[in-house]
Image: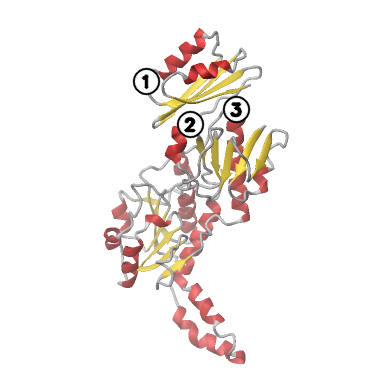
């Protein structure tokens, strides 16, 4: 029986996919085979030797110690695209509230609650202070054209905006989903110089942390409206506060406010609501659970952030050997030679690599004794070995 530990509240739509006779699921488990979580920060958490997989019900994995997991042969999954529609809708809402001062207008209207019959007249007299601009005809820059960025771009076109996208790592799958009407910028600077609205959809990496700073803001049109529903650390908060003060940035809508941004004129702080819909939570939980289940039961990997995608249909009557190793020369020859020495016939196999990690699925038409595991671990560079019958 597999032990699954939950570190956050996970939608039952996902957990219900785990058969009770095969899986024990609880937030309080020792030596789990796998962990499912959302935003729980794992960096200070000890990783038990039993742990084989971590499934994040969401896209971002900066709350998971990836390097430590890779060193211990732990596969980390995420769920790209599962919450894309929820985030997309909130981005569109952010663009609307940045244009029309809807939030300010609502707060002002609420302040009139004690004015009785005078409210309609006061509303008509005061509404002019909340006038704004329309999205139609404006230029939107979309940086990052993955699942969310592509959806935002397509829907912005439907709102009558001119959309310019930039993504040097655009995948074939994302390109297929993107409208041909989205213009492609030759570079980030080219995009920043011409857009009225900017929405950011890139991962938080060492190379992207604080990338939107004083230098980037100086390139932009005066009064630009910026949407950040990706990660707060992509923006240099001190620099954007100065840009808001001098009018270079008109409005900053962020789903990741911290204390330094609260109460700042021009900042619209959204309390991390990007994926907070019932549909999104269900979709992420279902996707995370299915990926984890497919790995634990068959050794297949899809949507891992630290291991290569690697899938092989399992034939009935075969025994499966799963081997994760460092991506160094001669590993396959050493593994296959050891199997041959132990009379293990290879019926089918697949090998994939990603950066410093390689992953092997090896099927045999003969039973494989557990004693082979210790022999394989003797090969220098082996990270994890598992038999699936």
Q: Nearer the viewer, residue 193 or 94?
A: 94
Nearer the camera: disc 3 or disc 2:
2
Q: Locate residue 289: give its quadrant.
A: top right
User: Residue at 40% of width from left, 71% of height from top?
Assistant: 266
Image position of 14 with respect to 136: above or below: above
Q: Nearer the viewer, residue 116 or 389?
A: 389
Residue identified by numbered label 1: 329
Which quadrant, please, contains the C terminus? top right
Image check: 385 left or right of 144? Answer: right
Q: Locate residue 347: give its quadrant.
A: top right
User: Residue at 41% of width from left, 21% of height from top?
Assistant: 380
Label 2, label 1: how many angstroms apart (C-alpha)? 18 Å
Which quadrant, please, contains the N terminus? top right
User: Residue at 46% of width from left, 57% of height from top?
Assistant: 229
Image position of 238 with respect to 360: above or below: below
- Under circle 2, the secondary element is loop
Image x and y of residue 233, in percent = 39, 55
Local packing at callout 1 (Cα closer than 10 Å; few below 14, some 14-19, many 20+) is few
Image position of 17 with respect to 186: above or below: above
Image position of 192 with respect to 297: above or below: below
Residue identified by numbered label 3: 298
Label 3, label 1: how many angstroms apart (C-alpha)? 26 Å
Image x and y of residue 207, in percent = 33, 47
Residue identified by numbered label 2: 73
Local packing at callout 2 (Cα closer than 10 Å; few below 14, some 14-19, many 20+) is many
């Amino acid at each position: 029986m597999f032990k699954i530990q939950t570190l956050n509240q996970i939608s039952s739509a996902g957990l219900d996919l785990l058969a009770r006779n095969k899986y024990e699921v609880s937030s309080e488990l020792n030596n789990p085979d796998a962990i499912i979580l959302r935003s729980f920060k794992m960096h200070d958490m000890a990783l038990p030797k039993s742990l084989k997989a971590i499934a994040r019900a969401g896209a971002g994995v900066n709350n998971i110690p990836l390097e430590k997991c890779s060193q211990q042969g732990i596969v980390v999954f995420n769920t790209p695209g599962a919450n894309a529609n929820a985030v997309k809708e909130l981005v569109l809402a952010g663009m609307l509230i940045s244009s029309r001062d809807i939030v300010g207008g609502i707060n002002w209207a609420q302040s009139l609650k004690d004015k009785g019959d005078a409210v309609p007249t006061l509303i008509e007299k005061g509404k002019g202070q909340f006038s704004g601009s329309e999205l139609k005809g404006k230029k939107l820059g979309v940086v990052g054209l993955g699942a969310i960025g592509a959806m935002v771009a397509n829907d912005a076109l439907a709102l009558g905006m001119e959309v310019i996208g930039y993504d040097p790592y655009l995948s074939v799958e994302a390109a297929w989903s993107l409208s041909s009407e989205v213009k492609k910028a030759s570079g980030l600077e080219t995009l920043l110089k011409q857009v009225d609205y900017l929405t950011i959809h890139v991962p938080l990496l060492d190379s992207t942390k604080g990338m939107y700073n004083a230098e980037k803001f100086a390139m932009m049109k005066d009064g630009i409206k910026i949407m950040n529903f990706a990660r707060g650390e992509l923006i240099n908060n001190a620099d954007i506060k100065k840009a808001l003060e001098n009018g270079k940035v008109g409005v900053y809508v962020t789903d990741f406010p911290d204390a330094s941004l609260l109460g700042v004129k021009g900042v619209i702080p959204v309390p991390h609501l990007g994926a907070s819909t019932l549909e999104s939570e269900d979709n992420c939980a279902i996707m995370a659970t299915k990926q984890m289940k497919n790995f634990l039961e068959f050794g297949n990997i899809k949507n891992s952030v630290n291991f290569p995608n690697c899938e092989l249909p399992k034939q009935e009557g075969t025994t499966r050997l799963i081997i994760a190793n460092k991506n160094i020369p001669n590993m396959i020859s050493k593994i296959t030679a050891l199997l041959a020495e132990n009379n293990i016939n290879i019926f089918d196999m697949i090998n994939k690599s990603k950066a410093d990690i390689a992953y092997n699925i090896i099927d045999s038409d003969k039973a494989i004794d557990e004693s082979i595991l210790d022999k394989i671990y003797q090969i220098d560079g082996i990270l994890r070995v598992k038999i699936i019958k």
